[in-house]
Amino acid sequence: GEDVEQSLFLSVREGDSSVINCTYTDSSSTYLYWYKQEPGAGLQLLTYIFSNMDMKQDQRLTVLLNKKDKHLSLRIADTQTGDSAIYFCAEKATGGTASKLTFGTGTRLQVTL
Amino acid sequence: NAGVTQTPKFQVLKTGQSMTLQCAQDMNHNSMYWYRQDPGMGLRLIYYSASEGTTDKGEVPNGYNVSRLNKREFSLRLESAAPSQTSVYFCAGIAGAGETQYFGPGTRLLVL
């Protein structure tokens, strides 16, 4: 079955760039997503990328997709304390009609002053 | 949270009690989902519904039942709660491009 892996923790200084990495196993994934979860809150969609793209940029966020290595990354430029949260990578399972997602375990981003 | 609401926000149950978690979406999409979130395990799919009147098991369905009451509502029922079901439960629906799932705010459940 599908599997999505992320590192558990990342610490960066305010103003630096953060890079959160994710690997997945389903080579036929069509969409890959990044969600952000702040303490006590639900998951907020940050961005997604279609599998025929290599890169997507949205303001401070840059998503890179390497399909050959099944590697997805999220770069946050000029990281702020408000970016402290858990970030989840997810892939859309292929087949069927219900757009099921497989989530990674999440990367906790800590932003220090 | 793009039109997904959940009730209640918090609940404490005793082992063996039953309860129903409610979810409603206003995105007019067919598919809805129930997940549980446990520390260090990300989100795991409990059940999903591809359309009104249909439901299917996800990764961890044991101990749960669901009802797709209509296009808007998808409820999750615990018939006999167990401490292992202590978790945060999220409902999701789909909206917009990318077949994107949007999540409700969650229900925090503690089973004693």
Image (tube, rainbow, N blue to C red):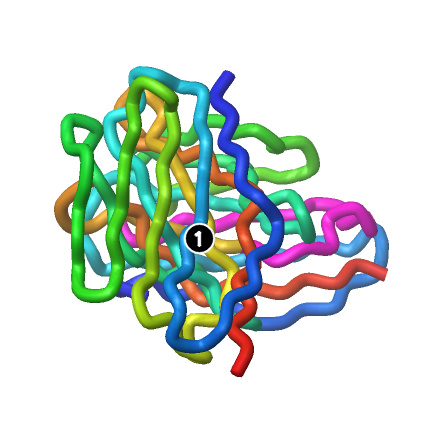
Which quarter of the picture shows residue A66? Answer: top left
Residue at the image position 61 percent from the left and 58 percent from the top = B88
Q: Amino acid at mark 1?
A: Cys
How far across and how far down the image is residue A36, in percent? 42, 60
Task: Please state if B85 lies on the left or on the right of A58 as rendered.
Answer: right
Residue at the image position 54 percent from the left and 57 percent from the top = B21
Residue A73 in sight = yes
How far across and how far down the image is residue A102, in percent? 45, 33
- The residue singled out by tag 1 in the image is B91
How far across and how far down the image is residue B45, in percent? 52, 37
Q: Nearer the viewer, residue A78 or B33?
A: A78
Q: Nearer the viewer, residue B51 or A106?
A: A106
Chain of residue at mark 1: B
Circle count: 1
Depicted B108 relative to depicted B39: above or below: below
Of all residues, the one furthest to the bottom in this rendering is A113
The stretch of residues the image draws in magenta is: B70-89
